Image (tube, helix red, strand yellow):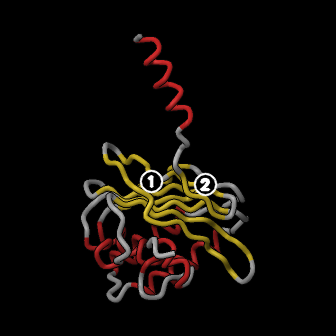
């Protein structure tokens, strides 16, 4: 009887599809773990520039929210991952970070500007199929991954909020449609 139950349970597990979200040929899991914390996919969005697809991004939070101010206010882990669907050079990425910062953060302190300079020093050319990610842990700051490789950490919630604001702030670099999608409003 135990073997029958075990076989039935195994069969049910195999039939249960893995949950995931897909966009532009990129599949992102519905949940990820950051340390001991489980994060849920808040939204998935496609960054387009002119007529070209650039990357698919996923925002992971402790709980879903479509309110940018509430997301930025919380002192909780979060993660943004970008899966590139075309090559992008480091210079274009660096310019986008500075443009996003200036368009979405009201009071840019010298310390915050220094943190964005540190971020820009971490940038490399990104090839199609590579990922970039930002994982915020309130205790340690933001871990930065570029082209699939850990590049270091940047301390402070000010940086974590500013980098996320480049996507969900009042003037998101990737556009209003991207912002709606990443906030789960699509």
Which one is in front, 76 or 14?
14
Residue at 46 percent of width and 57 percent of height: 144
- Answer with the quarter of the image where residue 177 lies: bottom right
Q: Is residue 98 visible?
A: yes
Q: Which of marks 2 and 1 is nearer the N terminus?
A: 2
Of the numbered discs in the image, which one, if any, rests on residue 152?
Answer: 1
Which one is in front, 109 or 46?
46
Residue at 43 percent of width and 49 percent of height: 32
Across and down, in percent, residue 179 comes to: 49, 78
The residue positioned farthest toward the front in the image shown: 1
Across and down, in percent, residue 160 comes to: 36, 67
User: Please, what secondary structure does the residue beneath circle 1 have?
Assistant: strand
- How far apart are the two marked residues, 2 and 1, measured between alpha carbons? 26 Å
- Label 1: few (<14), some (14–19) or many (≥20) C-alpha neighbours in 10 Å: few
Of the numbered discs in the image, which one, if any, rests on residue 106?
Answer: none
Q: Describe residue 148's horizontal placement relative to residue 100 as left or right.
A: right
Of the numbered discs in the image, which one, if any, rests on residue 27?
Answer: 2
- Answer with the quarter of the image where residue 21 lies: bottom right
Residue at 31 percent of width and 79 percent of height: 69
User: Do residues under tags 2 and 1 come within 8 Å of each other at their CB atoms?
Assistant: no
* Quadrant in which the N terminus is drawn: top left
Q: Describe residue 7's horizontal placement relative to residue 111 as left or right.
A: right
Q: Is residue 142 visible?
A: no
Residue at 60 percent of width and 65 percent of height: 56
User: Please, what secondary structure does the residue beneath circle 2 have?
Assistant: strand
Q: Describe residue 72's horizontal placement relative to residue 87 as left or right.
A: left
């Amino acid at each position: 009887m135990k073997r029958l139950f075990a076989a039935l349970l195994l069969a049910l597990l195999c039939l249960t599809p893995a949950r995931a979200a897909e966009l532009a040929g990129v599949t992102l899991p519905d949940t990820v773990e950051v340390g001991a914390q489980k994060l849920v996919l808040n939204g998935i969005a496609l960054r387009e520039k002119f007529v070209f697809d650039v990357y698919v991004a996923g925002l992971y939070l402790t709980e879903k929210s479509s309110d940018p101010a509430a997301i930025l206010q919380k002192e909780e882990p979060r993660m943004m991952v970008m899966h590139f669907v075309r090559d992008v050079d480091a210079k274009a990425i660096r310019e986008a970070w500075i443009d996003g910062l200036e368009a979405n953060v009201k009071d840019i302190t010298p310390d915050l500007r220094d943190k964005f300079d540190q971020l820009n020093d971490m940038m490399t050319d990104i090839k199609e199929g590579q990922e970039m990610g930002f994982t915020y842990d309130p205790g340690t700051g933001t871990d930065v991954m570029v082209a699939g490789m850990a590049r270091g950490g940047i301390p402070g919630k000010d940086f974590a909020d500013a980098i996320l604001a480049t996507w969900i702030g009042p003037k998101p670099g990737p556009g209003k449609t991207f912002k709606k999608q990443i906030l789960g409003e699509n």
